[in-house]
Image: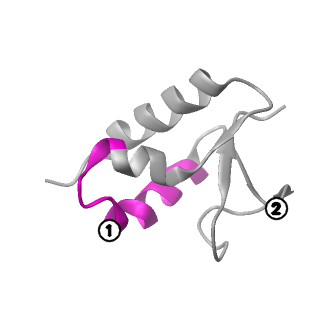
Amino acid sequence: MKPSDKEIADVLLDLAHQRGVGKTFCPSEAARALSDDWRRLMPEVRRVAAMLDLQATQKGTPVDPVTAKGPIRLGLPG
């Protein structure tokens, strides 16, 4: 069963707050916490992350988590 947007958001925000401001995490950490078949969840995780008060970066540069190609990091905005 696919997790709801709220379930995804809860995991993303929990990871972000565990790390704290100035620290980041890979969105796959959230996907892995939600499903054994985590790879299929990555587009949904990125989509939900874009709706939250999270900063997405790629090599330290802010990016859109939905359209960015390749690995990104998520964290609380500084």
The disc placed on residue 4 is none
Please name the predominant secondary structure of the magenta segment in the image. helix
Vertical position of residue 69 compared to residue 19: above or below: below
Image mark count: 2
Disc 2 residue type (three-letter): Lys
The residue at which mark 1 appears reads as: 40
**Badge nearest the viewer, 2 or 1:** 2
Q: Is residue 35 left or right of residue 1?
A: right
Where is residue 21, by image quadrant? top right
Name the residue rendered at 21%, 54% in the picture.
Answer: 2
Query: Badge 2 is on which residue?
Result: 59
Q: Amino acid at mark 1?
A: Arg
Please name the residue shown 66% across and 60% down the image. Answer: 72
- Most distant residue in the bottom direction: 69
C-alpha separation, residue under disc 2 versus residue under disc 1: 24 Å
Q: Quadrant of residue 8?
A: top left
Residue at left offset 32%, top offset 68%: 40
Q: Which residue is at the front of the view, 71 or 78?
A: 71
Q: Residue 57: name its quadrant.
A: bottom right
Q: Which residues are magenta?
A: 33-50
Q: Position of residue 60 (x, y in %)?
A: 85, 55
SS under mark 2: loop
**Scheme by which the image is coloured:** one colour
Task: Look at the image and say whether residue 45 sits in the magenta stretch.
Answer: yes
- Residue at (64% x, 27% y) in the render: 19
Residue 63 versus residue 16 in the image, above or below: below
* Depth order, front residue of 9/21: 21
